[in-house]
Image: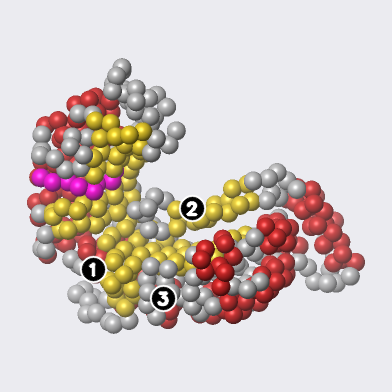
Amino acid sequence: EDHCNLNHLVEGSNALPDHGVSKMIVRGDISDLHNAFTRFMHLDCDTLTQMLKQSPNKIERVCLDHRENVSPEYLALLISLSNKAETLQIQQLEGDAAYSCLMAGLLQSDGPRKLVFRCRDSISLHQAHLLFKGIAFSPSLEKLLLSGEFEPCEDIGRTLVDSLGRNRRLKRLELSMDILDMDVEGILRTATLETQVQSLGIFGSEVDDIPLNILRDVLCREDCPLEQFNLFGVAPSSRPVAMNGDELNTTLVNSSVKGCSVINTIVDCSRIMETIGLFQSIETLFLFDNGISDLSPLDPLLIGSNATLKSLVLSADDVEETDVIEFFRKLPEMKCLRHVFFWEDPDDADNYSHSWKDVAVDAIRRSKSLECFEGGHFVDENFVDETKVALSLNRGGRRALEVESSSVLPANLWPRVLERAANIVYCDYSTIYEEEEELCCEGLKSLPVESTRVDVVFWLLREKMVGQCL
């Protein structure tokens, strides 16, 4: 079950169910456990702590959206929650004692693997030291999202830099611009030079910007470990900013980042493309709510010998129909592209005529590489029926069968072709988001919805036979 039905918990064993609880939200006067299927249940801190201690199971997500006068019972519950949570989300936390208990929870050997700290309360220097110490020496923490109203103090920035440098387990780091403003250069250098972070996200409030010269300095290095980079509500700024330290030994571009997301960033398209242009080997690009109206700047990523982009997720709300048509006309030339996702406001779908669909269907049929196209409200069942065979053929490896017209596929390869073709399935592809507090699209996964279709094997063989006869 996604959530636990709590009706039987107040009476009886005072234990969580054996099958486990996936999500717990603690809020209210003392503590209320809430889920989508039951009303709020009033549980005192001692009872809830006892439940947690008796349960052998971890809880996937615990959200603490609760502030009360500090009591020993509440502090004990805070440690127990830290001990049981795979993901610990802090919305409210007040008092030095509570921060000490949070630090203790982070330092446990079986503490949370992910901390989402979005505290709405003011955070003092001492409280920041306690939090950052827990982050620095946590033996289990792998993902960190950090945002909050920290006391304006240079020492907090230095402490965060030190704490990030000490944690060698972090794989994913997401920071608000409020945090980065304390020492944007030092924090980003540490995050990319002295940690094992593979995914870095920066988020703001649409009016925040980050200097491109600093991004280039920290990202464009031969030893950069990042594989994913995300901007959410943060505009890349071409205005150079003086740097405190010596510029690093940078290259012209980054060769390690494979995925990039730019979301909710309303700036000139050229600045977005300048940021994306820092990444030489980008394979997945997620562009959403950026006001991009012209798709032609994406051509260098999609067409030519240097093209590496395999997956493109794009909100098409602001794209003119003529640009969509031009994109599809170029589709057969996009040899690397495997997945295309166009998302839009349902109200905007009526602004497009049917002419683009004819162009899109023809382009998808001629493409040898595109394996999935998701058009949301732009497409209908007829569009799916007209393109699914071509997409299935491509998933089966049609491009691998491309030979010169004078050539014949060697007979010893046909068993391999038949084996692969027999395993083709029709798939629905969906963009997989983490929970709402995570800012990036981790990737695209396929969900098989039908078993092998014999007609796909037939069309694969038919196309090859006809091609050889011609």
Task: Indicate the amino acid at tag 3.
Answer: Ile
Can residue 255 be seen here? no
Picture quadrant where residue 8 is located:
top left
State the extent of the magenta-drawn residues as a range.
88-95
Q: Earlier in the sequence, mark 3 or mark 1?
A: 1
Task: Indicate the amino acid at tag 1.
Answer: Val
Q: Is residue 436 left or right of residue 100?
A: right
In the rendered image, the vertical position of residue 276 relative to residue 39, given as above or below? below
Colour mapping: secondary structure
| Image location of residue 268, percent across then percent down | 39, 80
Residue that extends furthest to the right in the rendered view of this protein = 469
In the rendered image, the vertical position of residue 417 relative to residue 75, given as above or below? below
* Foreground tag (1 vs 2): 2
* Foreground tag (3 vs 1): 3
**Residue position marked by numbered label 3 in the rendering:** 272
> Which residue is painted at 33% across and 50% down in the image?
143
Mark 1 secondary-structure assignment: helix
Q: Earlier in the sequence, mark 1 or mark 2?
A: 1
Q: Quadrant of the C terminus?
A: bottom right
Q: Say which mark, if any, is on residue 432.
A: 2
Can residue 316 be seen here? yes
Residue 382 is a magenta residue: no
Q: Earlier in the sequence, mark 2 or mark 3?
A: 3
Q: CA distance from mark 3 to mark 1?
A: 20 Å
Is there a contact, CB below 8 Å, between mark 3 and mark 1? no
Q: Say which mark, if any, is on residue 383.
A: none
| Image location of residue 320, percent across then percent down | 54, 78
**Residue position marked by numbered label 1 in the rendering:** 184
Picture quadrant where residue 151 is located:
bottom left
Q: Is residue 354 left or right of residue 136?
A: right
> Which residue is painted at 76% across and 62% down in the image?
401
